[in-house]
Amino acid sequence: MQNPSYRGSYKPFVSPRDPCPPITIKYFVLPPQIFTNFQQPGLPQNSPEEALMQGSLWPKFVDGFSREEGIS
Amino acid sequence: MNVFDERMRLLKTVQQMDFVVVEWTLYTDTHPNDEDALEKWREAIKNAAVARKQYENKFGPLSLKSIPSRQALELGWRWNQDPWPWQL
Amino acid sequence: MWVYEKKLLYPVEVTTCNPMLARYLMEQYGGADGELAAALRYMNQRYTVPDKVIGLLTDISTEEFSHLEMLATMIYKLTKDATPEQLEKAGLGAHFVNHGHSLFYENAGGVPFTATYIQSKGDPIADLYEDIAAEEKARATYQWLIDISDDPGINDALRFLRERENIHSLRFREAVELLKDERDRKKVF
């Protein structure tokens, strides 16, 4: 997980009759922008190289995503 | 470095510089009074123009807003010429 | 008006011939929460939103068209030299008989694009909230695409596109705040 502070989790009800092997903890995304209504001025910026690579000029709004997190 | 690699390298620099402009533009759309950001936006546009010129001098205009050099035309560069971006 | 730029917004590298993945990516090409829907939605709403947010809708819409071109590049490359048999195996047999190797605005299930995917209410808050929701839905779609794709080049581009949804969502949320600033102000025009 790239940044745990941008993820949530919960424990779903597990029935003994569930046909698939149950996943006991489910994770979901709480992306960075939902914690900010308005970007404050003067936030640290990425270099142009980093900015294009990350998809954002501001590291603060980058949370990343990968299959390895096991969110789905 | 072969010509293709050189082309992709210069193109990537254009993409990086242009992307910074995209970001400052969206930011200043919602922060029109952030003087510091407006200055950075100006700087980003200048840097993007420099990177673009470097690419275009070697590989021809990226848009119809750039002036094609006589040399490029003499060497056979045409707007309607591959590779197009999705072919590269 | 618009001027074409002979470059992609982000360098897309495709490492495999994988028509099945191309089929999935069509969700973001011609699907309900895809890039075409986003571009057309904002470009149409911009005529009747308060002046303060016209620039933002114009600029984000324009960026969405560059995302559409990235998706097109991925789909084109993943299917370029695939045989009809390969396409059929990937679930693109019906696509092939109707469209050959060409692209089409349809979703991953082959449903053609429709304007009913987008809305314009002429109410700034209703429109901006739809836009925020659209960005979050597109972000979620990119997540599931990343989960199902094993092409490193495609995943790299998808990660970039997912992050752009974060930024656009933020900007639309800021647009809402800008409109809230207009509340109850005694104005002399």
Image (spheres, coloured by chain):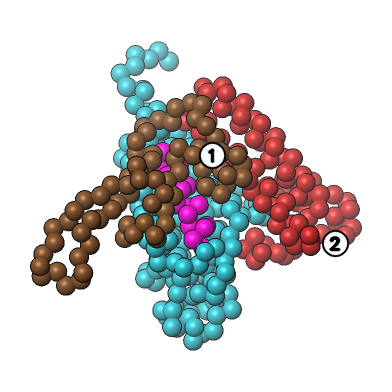
Chain colours: A brown, B red, C cyan
Residue C103: in sight, yes or no?
yes
Q: Position of residue A16 (x, y in %)?
A: 10, 67
Disc 1 chain ID: A
Which of these two is toward me, C166 or C122? C166
Nearer the viewer's eye, disc 2 or disc 1?
1
**From what the image shows, is residue A60 above or below residue C138?**
above
C113 to the left or right of B2: left
Q: Is residue A43 left or right of residue B20?
A: left
Residue C133 visible in rendering = no
- In the rendered structure, find residue A57 and report the number of the disc placed on it: 1
Q: How many marks?
A: 2
How far apart are the alpha carbons under marks 2 and 1? 38 Å
* Image position, residue C110 (x, y; %): 39, 71
Specify whether residue C48 is painted magenta. no
Q: Main secondary structure of the magenta part?
A: helix
Q: Report the magenta residues as a range.
A: C154-170
Q: Amino acid at mark 1?
A: Leu
Which residue sits furthest bottom? Answer: C85
Question: Where, quadrant-wise, is the C terminus of chain A in this rendering?
Answer: bottom left
Which residue is found at the position 10% from the left and 70% from the top? A17
Residue underneath mark 2 = B76
